[in-house]
Image: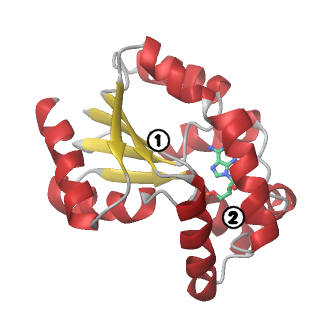
Amino acid sequence: MKYLVLFGPPGSGKGTQSENIIKKYGYAHISTGDVLRAEMANQTELGKTAKGYIDAGQLVPDDLIIDMLAKTMDGYTEAKGIIFDGFPRTVAQAKALKEMLGKRGSDVTVMINLQVDNDELVKRLLERGKISGRSDDNLETITKRLETYNTQTAPVIDFYKEDGKLENIQGVGSIDDIFAAISKVIDSKA
Ligand code: AMP
């Protein structure tokens, strides 16, 4: 099974490109943000706890996320591949993922890092906010999320670089061109 970490700051196109990967490669998709939004919609204990962090543009604590991810991943033992979208977001999460996959006798296949500059991210997220209905797509929370990304999440890039898994891809340009670059990386790891 292939394990693909689709990485990048908020607004870098992880969700859009996940859809393309699912269509072409038939991989399963785990977005920790989507799982958390479902928990919030169902008003579970986890959802209620997560809401405070999400609306403040902060990360939900590692132990909650790692536990949630492990449970979600248990549902995908037969998939051809799994896309991790929005996870890992801290080095502790990256280490936990390596341990979980190690128990399956496996490891992350590749980490694709979508690179987009800050001004473009703010522009995209504000645009998305007009239609997404997401409580965190407003300027104040966007600014906080990008700050959180830079301080807590960006160090994950070095973790995968040292592990020999990092592939950088420019996340600016046409969606099709970006997907072509992603496909090339996935095909090279087949
Ligand atoms: P996303 O949909 O990936 O942009 O996630 C929305 C929000 O959910 C983030 O701003 C975080 O508050 C929370 N979240 C999603 N994934 C994670 C994660 N792996 N670790 C911590 N918090 C997360």
Locate the C terminus and report the quarter of the image it occupies.
top left
Dot 1: within a 10 Å radius of its alpha carbon, few (fewer than 14), some, or many (20 or more) residues?
some
Q: Nearer the viewer, residue 87 or 72?
A: 87
Residue 178 rendering spot, x and y as whole percentages? 26, 56
> Picture quarter containing residue 65?
top right
Q: Nearer the viewer, residue 1 or 132?
A: 132
Q: How is the image coloured?
A: secondary structure
Looking at the image, residue 90 lies above or below residue 147: above
Residue 83 rendering spot, x and y as whole percentages? 37, 46
Locate the N terminus and report the quarter of the image it occupies.
top left
Q: Nearer the viewer, residue 43 or 128?
A: 128
Type of amino acid under label 1: Met
Going from the N terminus, do you reach mark 1 or mark 2 first? 2
Q: Which residue is mark 2?
A: 39
Horizontal relation, residue 190 to residue 122: left or right = left
Looking at the image, residue 126 lies above or below residue 185: below
Type of amino acid under label 2: Glu
Horizontal relation, residue 122 to residue 75: left or right = right
Residue at 37 percent across and 58 percent down: it is 172
Q: Nearer the viewer, residue 28 or 127?
A: 127
Q: Which residue is mark 1?
A: 73
> Picture quarter containing residue 93?
top right
What is the spatial separation of the Cα atoms under label 1 and label 2, in whole angstroms? 16 Å
